[in-house]
Image (cartoon, rainbow, N blue to C red):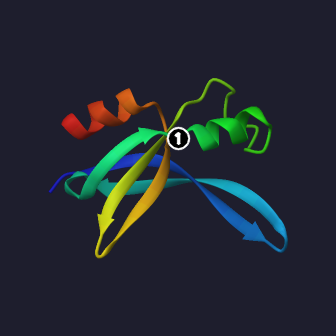
């Protein structure tokens, strides 16, 4: 089993406001089904809706994990090439 550390961005609803939070996430690479570029988060970044600590050149990837009966999607900071390299290590 190989565990890989990534930085994820998640949406949290606080009262009626959405906030985006960065967190470390550890993923078992054996549970990764697929990954692709996350254009939605890129759009959110360019429209100024993400934390200002994220540079405007940041790329995002969406990783789909096998989580029991239902897949789970996690948005990771980094381009898909970075995700591919980390999964191949």
Q: Is residue 89 visible?
A: no
Q: On the rendered structure, is 3 left or right of 25?
A: left
- Residue 75 against residue 66 in the figure, above or below: above
- Residue 28 against residue 78 in the figure, above or below: below
Whole-percent x, y for residue 20 in the image:
69, 54
Seen from the viewer's position, the closer of residues 3 and 11 is 11
Q: Is residue 8 visible?
A: yes
Q: Which residue is drawn at the image coordinates 55% and 31% (left, top)?
A: 59
Whole-percent x, y for residue 43 in the image:
69, 37
Which residue is most to the left? 1
Q: Which residue is drawn at the image coordinates 41% and 64% (left, top)?
A: 72
Seen from the viewer's position, the closer of residues 71 and 4 is 71
Q: Which residue is mark 1?
A: 38
Q: Quadrant of residue 80?
A: top left
Whole-percent x, y for residue 18 in the image:
77, 61
- Residue 61 against residue 10 in the figure, above or below: above
Within-10-Å neighbours for mark 1: few <14, some 14–19, many 20+ = many
Whole-percent x, y for residue 54 in the image:
67, 35
Q: Which residue is drawn at the image coordinates 28% and 75% (left, top)?
A: 68
Which residue is most to the top? 57
The quadrant of the picture occupied by the C terminus is top left
Q: On the rendered structure, is 29 left or right of 38?
A: left
The quadrant of the picture occupied by the N terminus is bottom left
- Element type where label 1 sits in the image: loop
Q: On the rendered structure, is 83 left or right of 87?
A: right
Q: Which residue is drawn at the image coordinates 30% and 76% (left, top)?
A: 69
Which residue is most to the right? 16
């Amino acid at each position: 089993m190989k565990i890989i550390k990534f930085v994820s961005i998640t949406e949290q609803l606080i009262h009626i406001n959405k906030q985006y939070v960065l967190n470390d996430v550890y993923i078992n690479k054996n549970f990764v089904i697929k990954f692709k570029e996350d254009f939605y988060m890129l759009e959110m970044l360019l429209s100024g809706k993400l934390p200002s600590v994220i540079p405007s050149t940041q790329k995002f990837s969406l990783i789909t994990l096998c989580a029991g009966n239902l897949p789970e999607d996690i948005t990771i900071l980094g381009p898909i090439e970075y995700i591919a390299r980390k999964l191949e290590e």
